[in-house]
Image (cartoon, rainbow, N blue to C red):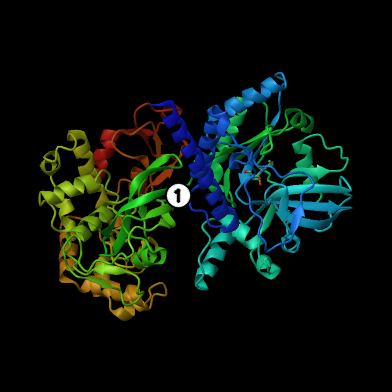
Amino acid sequence: MNNIFLLKKIKDRINFLRKEIIKHDYFYYNENNPKISDKEYDDFVKELKNLEAENPNFNLYDSPSHKVSGSLSSNFRHIKHFSNMLSLDNTYSYTEIMEWHKKISKKIFNKNIEFIIEPKIDGLSANLIYVDGTLISGSTRGDGLIGEDVTENIKTIKSIPYKLATDSFSNFFELRGEVYINKKNFKELNNNIIKHGHKKFVNSRNAASGSLRQKNKNITASRKLDFFVHSIGFSENNNIINQFDFLQLCKKHGFKIQEDFKICSSLKEIYEYVNIIFNKRDFFVYEIDGLVIKVNDFKLQNEIGCTNKSPRWAIAFKFPAKQATTIIKKIEVHVGRTGRITPLAILEPVFVSGVTISNATLHNFDEIKRLNINEGDTVLIERAGDVIPKIVKVIKKKKKNFFNVPHFCPSCNSIILKETIDKVTYRCINYRCKEQFKNRLIHFASRDSMDIFGFGEVVIDQLLERNKIKLISDIYSLTFNDFIELNLFGKKKTNNILKSILFSKKKPLNRLLFALGIKHLGKEKSKIIAKKFKNIKALINATSSDFIKIPEIGNKLCTSLKMFFESKYNLNIINYLIKFGVNIEESVLQIDNGFFKNKTFVFTGKLLNYKRKQIYEIIESFGGIISEYINNRVDYIIVGSNPGFKLSKAKIFNIEIIDEKKLESILIS
Ligand code: IVH
């Protein structure tokens, strides 16, 4: 490409990036309402910095890449900081940490550097000035030189001491830290806000920022803000040597510090700690978005110095973003096992905190309305913990019209109705709907129900296609050939599934009740009901007043149970289940062969065909006892492949040995 054209392209891109950064700074700092994720913002800054470094002619002094981002609202008086409040350089990879480490080691001629790593709190920074041990002002970071005067609001935060507990370490100093709101209080705050018809905060950082920057300090006081000290600004003579001592001193003076810090002296230790905290991230009671790696020694920090935007002696390692923007390709509706219709957003695939996301849950149609989303919209999505991502908000709308709830079931074309009780749930009212049936089968076989190992969606889909299952009870009439014909797996797995189906017959009644997928009946209530009624026949004969007598059964569940056990379709299934030998009693002891009752079993080695937990449950349901230790009270040792020392110990005690084959034959007999 012609050089001039290339330069023009670069200049345009630089201008575009500068405008975007300034625009998003405004949304983030002034409106507490970011429109893109942190990672997307950081990528803009990184790209701009690179382009400016490669093209010094375009590197203007007032570029946003040289300035500390922030805002100064005219709602507050302004306060000049005694020393500038800088920002931190962000990194997202170990390679970048390694490069930073190399750079500073070079700068101070490879002295053995000690680092201190602290979690990076996702809040907003505040500057506190103490004179003679009394808090005289509190301000936001603002543009780094001047902040907003939020002293009165700061004074409402309980974890910020107004007067220091002991003689302060200096007569005049600035303390810096993060104002934040913990996860529990953030949730409560948002629930409250929605109740009052206001728009909720997108994340806890925005909630903290919006709550601190209130004109009315009583509102701030009601928001349960918190504060962690993390650095020192200007300070008249003090003898503090390093960050570690500084934190301990702050603690002594009554401040809260993060206890999850670590002193490290090698890159390896740094990586290890970053990993540890990353894995613990969701267990923190407050949000953290990364770690800050700092040179511990204050003298060395001075030697290494700062740019006008950030210190060179510290760096932030940001965790992979939990948020990202993407486009909703389609809104699909799914039919659950109880006919419940739930919407699902199919997304343009996007990379979020280490995984590619291609769909997001929408709990119900009210949520679609609340978020005002439709197909084609650009949205901000967020992953919290391991849960499926959710849509936080719309960033750009494509269509003006609303997404409409479908009138007919996408699977069976029956009518979809809104529940009259909760007025939120929509259901396909056809109990024989194919999709409902498929999901009932998946639920029946699932781990907490009948626990049929290997009998998942793929297998079920194919069996349904071949018309092998018409009623749930047909699971128990499936043959070896039915599975082999699917060409999904070989003999061994087929045998395992068949065995697992066989074992499932011995599950206690509470499992069967839960597996049947009765509306409003969860695991715990299944246990209560099974314990009270003991046998499924008693449930069939029960009247509404028998049900309602049980405190845990409310009107909704009572109606649902009654309807279920009155339906001819369901009674037919129950009859088949009984015919196939499925246990219908809560106590299964009477139907076992007596072998296990009151006998103690120890396991050693790996079982080839079963999960240990599965066998433990069966043995216990037959009245057997599972033990970890070999002693003279043990009756049998079950031996798998590669047995451990327990086997030799068992031989000394003359304990009878049972291998997997023999165990199988006893179980099936
Ligand atoms: S040390 C440059 N330590 O992150 C000032 N900052 O993105 C040195 N932050 O403005 C700050 N947790 O408000 C430090 N443990 C921590 C922190 C932390 C959160 C904030 C701080 C800073 C921002 C930079």
Relative horizontal placement of residue 235, taking residue 326 as reference (left or right): right
Tell me: is circle 1 under 8 Å from ligand 1: no
Residue highlighted by disc 1? 383
Whole-percent x and y of residue 352?
Answer: 43, 43
Q: Is residue 432 above or below residue 358?
A: below
Q: Does any portion of residue 287 appear in the rendered image?
A: yes
Q: What is the three-letter code of the residue carrying label 1?
A: Arg
State whether residue 236 is above or below residue 138: above
Identified at 44% across, 35% down, the residue is: 9
Q: Secondary structure at mark 1?
A: loop
Q: Which of the two residues, 300 or 49, is positioned nearer the viewer here?
A: 49
In the image, 600 versus 603, the foreground residue is 603
Q: Residues within 10 Å of mark 1 (few under 14, many from 20)?
A: many
Lateral position of residue 449 relative to residue 242, left or right: left
Judge left or right: residue 465 versus residue 370.
left
Which image quadrant shows ligand 1?
A: top right
In percent of the image, x 26 and y 34: which residue is there?
Answer: 661
| Along the viewing direction, whichever of 431 and 136 lies nearer the viewer | 136
Q: Which is more toward the observer, 486 or 474?
A: 486
Whole-percent x, y for residue 624 in the image: 37, 47
Q: Residue at x 36, y 50 (%)?
A: 327
Looking at this view, name the residue that lies furthest to the bottom: 545
Q: Is residue 479 left or right of residue 133?
A: left
Q: Quadrant of the N terminus?
A: top left
Whole-percent x and y of residue 647?
41, 29
The quarter of the picture where residue 412 lies is bottom left
Name the quadrant of the C terminus.
top left
Task: Report the number of discs.
Answer: 1
Residue 197 pos. (x, y %): 50, 72
